[in-house]
Image: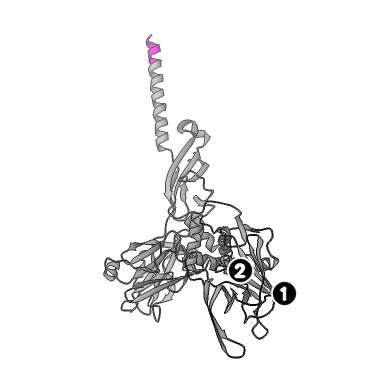
Amino acid sequence: MVVLGRWSLTAVCLGLVVAAAAVAALLAWPSVGVAASPSGIAGISLPGFSGHVEQLSVKKSGGKAVPVALRGGTIWPLVRLKPGQRLTVTVQIRRPSWIGWLVGGQEKQTMTVVTPAAHIRATLLRPKRGTPVTVSFAEPVSRVAIGNGRLQRLGTGRSVVPLGIRASGTATAGTTTVAAAVRPWETLSRPAHVSWFVPGARRSVVAEPASGSRVSPLTPLTLTFAQPVGSVLGSRLPELEPAMPGHWEQVDSHTLTFRPSGLGLGIGGTVFVRVPGRTVAWRVGPGSTLRLQELLARLGYLPVRWRQAASAAPTPASEVAAAVSAPQGTFSWRYAQTPVSLQTLWKPGSWNVVTQGAVMRFENVHGMATDGVAGPQVWRALMHDDLTGRRYDSGYSYVFVHETIPQSMSLWHAGRVIVTSPGNTGIASAPTATGTWPVFEHISVGTMSGTNPDGSHYNDPGIRWISYFHGGDALHEFPRSSFGTPQSLGCVELPEAAAAAIWPYTPIGTLVTIES
């Protein structure tokens, strides 16, 4: 009994010694180190006998894996990463087998890193006259893009970067954008507006984009003042002329930005902002002729229809984007029996008299000046009608006049000829010009006056059913004993019954073709 107890005590003691040794080995055994890296995503240190990297993963905050490579103890991304991006780095180590039984075969280390972001120390600069304008960063950057210039690679990095401008002459005040990246493997930061004012210079406000430049309908407009906004404007905000949907926001003590909303700035127009001592203006880029035709066709103002390739419910933002870059789609004739003379006038994507007439018809329906020019007011109304589904359902009209004797006039409407009548065109000394023109004035009764070929003057009151289409030429009634031969001074004279019948179908914008 005594001998057995002594051996049991010895075994227990030996077990305690072995356990203590194992704990000591585990605590003292070299461990892998994962830490931030001055160049890559992170650095891995492997002390002697700690083992080798068995598995390495880097994931974005949403769990998506980032392809990486381990070179020289540094983890490098194989794709460009955004600045300020949070990453989770996981490193799994396989220990040597001869010690793994004691301290464990594997070790895992996890850490979170954030990719560095370039921070500009000051966006409002006060350079001395005659000195280069420079921008300073909180830490060295490896790449920088200034304004619309080319990307500059700065090697090991620089904390102070010249903007390529000397503060002298006309450059005593100005603004530009600066985007930079701390690491070569990062994408550039969002462009920041940087403005400078030479102390004592007369210019007190700068604009980005620059005043006079072309902008898109949804481009933010930024004003930076040499003095704090409050001391320059008080409690009032600048006003856009003409008024546009959007809002002003104060970016910092010296900077205001107008952010357009809805249908944005007027397409093809000019926007003005008046501030103390200066007027700033921007030109808004024109809309696409093809998109203009697409909208006019979809709303019923053209003899063609248009179907979008990929249909989607329109939104204000999509309308603006489409106005600048027309979506794909197909045009087709609305009517089976479209006159050949009308078909030859139509060409998608190119400005033509068919488009001009449709714009004039649209302007007239909406109470605008009928100049046939697709300006800001026309574009805004077109996009609004497209969003609300407001269509023109009166059908498409077209008038063609044959000058061959017997001369005749035909009115084509919504796919068929509904009125045909003999008519009179101009005599040899005052001919009716051949070609196609849109009706620009439409009156039920008026006085027609002018000069006869012999120099005498005429004044004919009470002329009815007048549709002017080219200078002083018009479709109208006129009392004649016969019709079908040249008798007028350039107009197309019609019997009263025929003139009265076609007049409701020839509103402003209707095309009239004179064929010899």
Residue at figure coordinates x 60%, y 66% from the top left:
501
Rendered image quadrant of residue 354 = bottom right
> Residue 393, position in %: x, y?
56, 58
Q: Secondary structure at mark 2?
A: helix
Q: Main secondary structure of the magenta part?
A: helix
Does the magenta run of residues contain 420? no
| The residue stretch that appears in magenta | 1-6
Residue furthest to the top in view is 1
Q: Quadrant of residue 166?
A: bottom left
User: Of callouts 2 and 1, which one flags the residue occurring earlier in the amino acid sequence?
Assistant: 1
The residue carrying mark 1 is 406
Q: Nearer the viewer, residue 342 or 413?
A: 413
- Tag nearer the camera, 2 or 1: 2
Helix or strand or loop: what does disc 1 sit on? loop
Q: Residues within 10 Å of mark 2 (few under 14, many from 20)?
A: few
Q: Nearer the viewer, residue 216 or 151?
A: 216
Residue, disc 2: 497
